[in-house]
Amino acid sequence: MIAVTRVIAETNGFLLFNSIRQLVSYAGLDVTQDQSGQYKGKSRLSKKGNAHLREALYMPALCAATHNENLKAFYFRLNEKFNHKKQSLVAVMRKLLILIYTLWKSGQEYNPQHQWQEKRREASLPPLDSH
């Protein structure tokens, strides 16, 4: 609860943000690519945003990656992909921030059984013909 209060305080109740992308950039949780001309370097976290916001999200992300079933599966799936576990944890931090923003803007309560991906997939499927 304290972490959510800190996030709301650091973002001024999300009044300055029109999109999730703006919020993620403000938090410094966006990925930047080091490139110039033909050279393409490694991508990394920008960390140009609000350090207090990232600090407020660190421990909740660690707890969510351990105890929340959906985020735990997400965290372990990313651990297989990334070299360092901290990269997966930052992805969980980003997901938590987006979740807080979405719930705050919509006025809904958190529902752990809510299937975000299922609705997106169903919306993209063509309607069934009844022959």
Image (tube, helix red, strand yellow):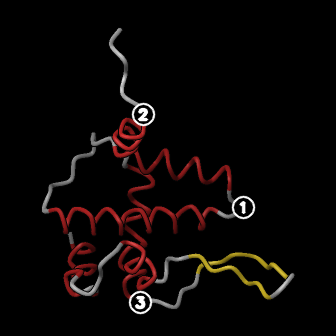
Q: Which residue is mark 2?
A: 125
Q: In the rendering, which numbered label is found on residue 50?
A: 3
* Circle 2: residue type: Leu
In the rendered image, the quadrant that contains the C terminus is top left
Which residue is outermost to the right? 38
The total of numbered circles placed on residues is: 3
**The one of 106 and 71 positioned closer to us in this rendering:** 106
Q: CA distance from mark 2 to mark 3?
A: 39 Å
Residue 95, percent across and down?
Answer: 41, 62
Element carrying mark 2:
loop
Going from the N terminus, do you reach mark 2 or mark 3 first? 3
Q: Is residue 117 left or right of residue 13?
A: right
Element carrying mark 1:
loop
**Looking at the image, is 121 positioned above or below residue 41?**
above
Quadrant hosting residue 103 = bottom left
At 27% across and 39% down in the image, what residue appears?
A: 113
**The one of 125 and 88 positioned closer to us in this rendering:** 125
Q: Which residue is mark 1?
A: 83
Q: Are marks 2 and 3 in contact (CB under 8 Å)?
A: no
